[in-house]
Image (cartoon, rainbow, N blue to C red):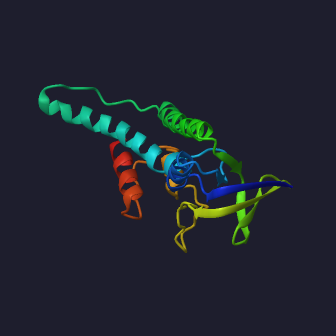
Amino acid sequence: MKEVHADLVILGGGPGGYTAAFRAADLGKKVVIIEKENKLGGVCLTIGCIPSKTLLHAADTVRRAKESSGLGIAFSEPGIDLDVLRNHTNSVVKKLTDGLGSLAVVRKIERIHGNGKFINAHSLIVRTGETDETTVTFNHCIIAAGSRPVEIPGIPYSDERIWGSTEALSIPFIPPRLVVIGGGIIGLEMAAVYHEL
């Protein structure tokens, strides 16, 4: 079993986690980030805000083309290649997550890929594989564990017509009709994207 000690341990490599890690490292602290995914960025960057904003930009391009006829500029009906759109979105995400990884390396932040579990007030165990574990002791800890979509009781999520935000952001296809449950940021953004596409 590997053992690591840090001034500051951060559980979660999303926007709250990596910004705290970068600031602490800049102040001279030894920092360890524990993240279950093999990249920094969290839900926001990988399956939330950034993919959503990238798709909103594409949808806005379609909207502007439609509205340009009022200026005397006409475009034919847009063709949408979902594979190209998905690949573009994935490349934006990859560029940003790779950039965060480089910033962590420059700051000498140690990253541990796995799930952390507290064993007392100043240490935790990180399962880093099937059998591998790392004990991490620390002076301070920040829990920045992020979020996940909530499943509404009684809705049959096994039905392929029902998507959570993660599935909606992957754009499996453009349905002729779509109902969005939830008027929060991601719900409004998905409604806008699918409406324009």
Identify the residue shown where x is 13% and y is 33%.
70
Q: Position of residue 111 (x, y in %)?
A: 67, 47
Name the foreground residue: 79 vs 132: 132
Is residue 174 visible in the rendered structure shown here? no
Residue 39 image-quadrant placement? top right
Residue 118 image-quadrant placement? bottom right
- Position of residue 137 relative to residue 96, above or below, is below
State left or right for residue 7 relative to residue 57: right
Q: Position of residue 88 (x, y in %)?
A: 49, 32
State left or right for residue 118 relative to residue 130: left
The quadrant of the picture occupied by the N terminus is bottom right
- Position of residue 43 relative to residue 119, above or below, is above
Is residue 189 visible in the rendered structure shown here? yes
The quadrant of the picture occupied by the C terminus is top left
Identify the residue shown where x is 65% and y is 49%.
37
Name the foreground residue: 27 vs 35: 27
Q: Position of residue 4 (x, y in %)?
A: 76, 54
- Position of residue 94 relative to residue 31, above or below, is above
State left or right for residue 158 relative to residue 114: left
The extreme left residue here reads: 71
Q: Position of residue 65 (x, y in %)?
A: 26, 32
The extreme front residue here reads: 28
* Circle count: 0
Identify the residue shown where x is 73% and y is 56%.
5
State left or right for residue 49 relative to residue 150: left
